[in-house]
Amino acid sequence: MTYEEIFILGWNLNLLMFLTNLALAIRTMNQKSREQLLQENEVLSELKAEFDFYYPYRKYETLVTYLIPFTAFFRMSYRIFEMLSFFSKNKGTTLIDYMIYKYRNDIELAKNKIK
């Protein structure tokens, strides 16, 4: 297997994880009403603003992650495993609950690093 084939395989796996992530988001949005989505969006927007304060370059990090072969695949695989563990531990929760938990947890980690 050449380096070129390895890179192509890595980018294909990154693309697979991007599409998996997109499918999860669309599936989640289709299960909610417009009002519920707007309400959840407000909560997530507030958390995202605070998150962006502590991690201002996160958008670029995510973009670079998808450009480097295999990186997004392993990163998203870990996130999906973490998400499934969260759901099994907390019965009756949704993807939004996980996102809120993750934002709050990351914000707390950043605040503790600053102190």
Image (cartoon, rainbow, N blue to C red):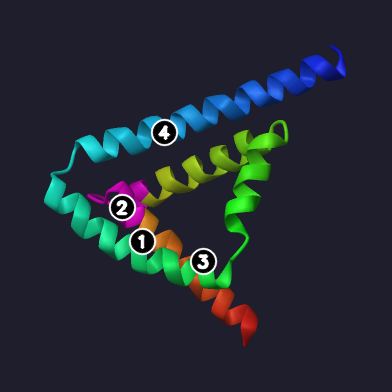
The disc at residue 52 is 3
Q: Residue at x 51, y 45 (%)?
A: 79
Position of 1 relative to 14 (above/below): above
In the image, farthest residue toward the top: 1
How far separated are the C-alphas under marks 1 and 4? 18 Å
Of marks 3 and 1, which one's residue comes earlier in the chain?
A: 3
Under mark 2, the amino acid is: Ile
How far separated are the C-alphas under marks 2 and 3? 18 Å
Q: Residue at x 26, y 50 (%)?
A: 91
Q: Residue at x 21, y 35 (%)?
A: 30
The image position of residue 92, as x and y in percent, is 22, 49
Q: Residue at x 50, y 75 (%)?
A: 108
Under mark 4, the amino acid is: Leu
Q: Marks 3 and 2: in contact by CB < 8 Å?
A: no
The disc at residue 22 is 4
The disc at residue 12 is none
Judge the density around disc 2: few (<14), some (14-19), many (≥20) Cα neighbours within 10 Å: some
Of marks 1 and 4, which one's residue comes earlier in the chain?
A: 4
Q: Secondary structure at mark 4?
A: helix
- Which of these two is toward me, 56 or 99? 56
Judge the density around disc 3: few (<14), some (14-19), many (≥20) Cα neighbours within 10 Å: few
User: Comparing marks 4 and 2, which lies closer to the viewer?
Assistant: 4
Of marks 2 and 3, which one's residue comes earlier in the chain?
A: 3
Q: Marks 1 and 2: in contact by CB < 8 Å?
A: yes
How far separated are the C-alphas under marks 2 and 1? 6 Å
The residue pinned by badge 1 equals 100
Chain part drawn in magenta: 87-98
